[in-house]
């Protein structure tokens, strides 16, 4: 299957919604983004790989799938989505009228969004963008607001011009979601991307992203192995100080930062999802960051 990490992320959200009564993050649309064949194939591949995730596990195939989703696939996906969409709500409340979803894969925010006046831009690789639009048409889903799909390569700078040409207002505050991106870019590529965003996001705009910690443990290593097996190897890790300095160079100030323990307490208090060792649910590398953008004078457009 193509776009494996994006498909697995959609699967994690779909499985969580369909198999729980109390949700960390409710996404009733995610399952519709997957074909029946894809959903079944991912379910089988994951449950059959239980020995990789938990060699000590004993149980049925369905129990194995539940274990893997609840302990490996879903926690970081659910927590970062909850954190990000909460931040979007706050941004809209104070006047933000445009949201840019970078490398958004099969994210379904535009299909669930309740703010009709909000303009959304979705940026991803051309093949991913075309495939997502095809899936939306096939399932009869409709966006609730104006959405611009932009196929591009985020490692280049040309996407900035295309974004503006498609209606992005540089003089209007915006919110940028960069979930799951920093893992797959080198540090220089990540610095370049943040700097490019700073060059056109006006003061009062904000961005939100997660990033892998330099001191990540065993689960971090499993995540890296899974990504590499899917053909999308992770390239970088960061300390908090290193990320703070990188953001400062681009003119961004930290507005809110949440580590794994804080995310567990904030988002999983009412959830039955638990780690095998009982210490929490949010994996080590998945710290959250929401940046309040104040571009440097030299970066203004």
Image (cartoon, rainbow, N blue to C red):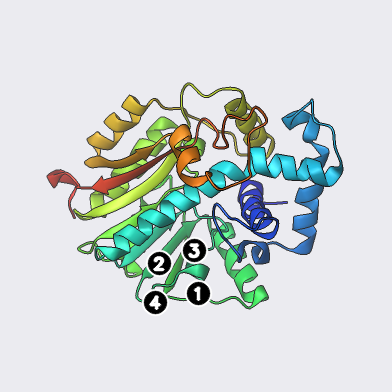
Secondary-structure class at tag 2: strand
Q: Observer-nearest residue: 289 or 258?
A: 258
Secondary-structure class at tag 1: loop
| Contact flag, marks 2 and 1 (Cβ < 8 Å) | yes
Q: Position of residue 43 (x, y in %)?
A: 78, 49
Q: Position of residue 175 (x, y in %)?
A: 33, 57
| Contact flag, marks 1 and 4 (Cβ < 8 Å) | no
For the point 77% across and 44% down, the residue is: 65
Q: CA distance from mark 1 to mark 3?
A: 9 Å
Q: Examine the image and state in which quarter residue 141 appears.
A: bottom right
Q: Position of residue 181 (x, y in %)?
A: 48, 43
Which residue in the structure is indicated by mark 4? 116
State which tag comes first along the sequence, 3 or 4: 3
Residue 143 visible from this viewpoint: yes
For the point 41% across and 44% down, the residue is: 209
For the point 58% across and 37% down, the residue is: 281
Image mark for residue 120: 2
Graded by Cα atoms within 10 Å as few (under 14), some (14 to 19) or many (20 or more), the crowding at tag 4 reads few
Q: CA distance from mark 2 to mark 3?
A: 9 Å
Which residue in the structure is indicated by mark 3? 109
Q: CA distance from mark 2 to mark 4?
A: 10 Å
- Circle nearer the viewer, 2 or 3: 3
Which residue in the structure is indicated by mark 1? 143
State which tag comes first along the sequence, 2 or 3: 3
């Amino acid at each position: 299957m193509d776009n494996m990490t994006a498909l697995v992320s959609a699967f994690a959200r779909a499985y969580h919604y369909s198999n729980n009564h109390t949700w960390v993050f409710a996404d009733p649309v995610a399952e519709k983004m997957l074909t029946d064949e894809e959903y079944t194939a991912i379910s089988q591949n994951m449950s059959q790989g239980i020995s990789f995730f938990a060699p000590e596990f004993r149980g049925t195939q369905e129990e194995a799938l539940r274990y893997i989703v609840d302990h490996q696939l879903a926690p970081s996906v659910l927590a970062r989505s909850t954190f990000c969409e909460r931040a979007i709500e706050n941004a809209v409340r104070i006047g933000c009228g445009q949201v840019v979803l970078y490398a958004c894969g099969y994210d379904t925010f535009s299909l669930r969004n309740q703010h009709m006046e909000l303009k959304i831009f979705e940026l991803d690789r051309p093949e991913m963008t075309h495939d997502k639009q095809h899936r939306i048409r096939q399932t009869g889903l409709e966006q609730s607001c104006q959405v611009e799909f932009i196929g591009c390569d985020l490692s280049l700078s040309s996407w900035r011009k295309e974004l503006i040409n498609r209606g992005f207002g540089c003089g209007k505050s915006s919110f940028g979601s960069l979930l799951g991106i920093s893992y797959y870019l080198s540090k220089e590529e990540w610095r370049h991307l943040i700097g490019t965003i700073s060059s056109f996001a006006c003061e009062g705009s904000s961005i939100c992203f997660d990033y892998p910690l330099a001191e990540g443990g065993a689960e971090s290593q499993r995540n890296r192995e899974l990504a590499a097996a899917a053909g999308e190897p992770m390239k970088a890790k960061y300390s908090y100080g290193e990320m703070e300095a990188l953001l400062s160079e681009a003119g961004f100030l930290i507005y809110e930062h949440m580590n794994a323990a804080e995310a567990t307490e904030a988002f999983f208090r009412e959830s039955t999802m638990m780690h095998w060792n009982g210490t929490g649910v949010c994996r080590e590398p998945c710290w959250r960051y929401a940046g309040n953008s104040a571009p440097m004078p030299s970066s203004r457009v």
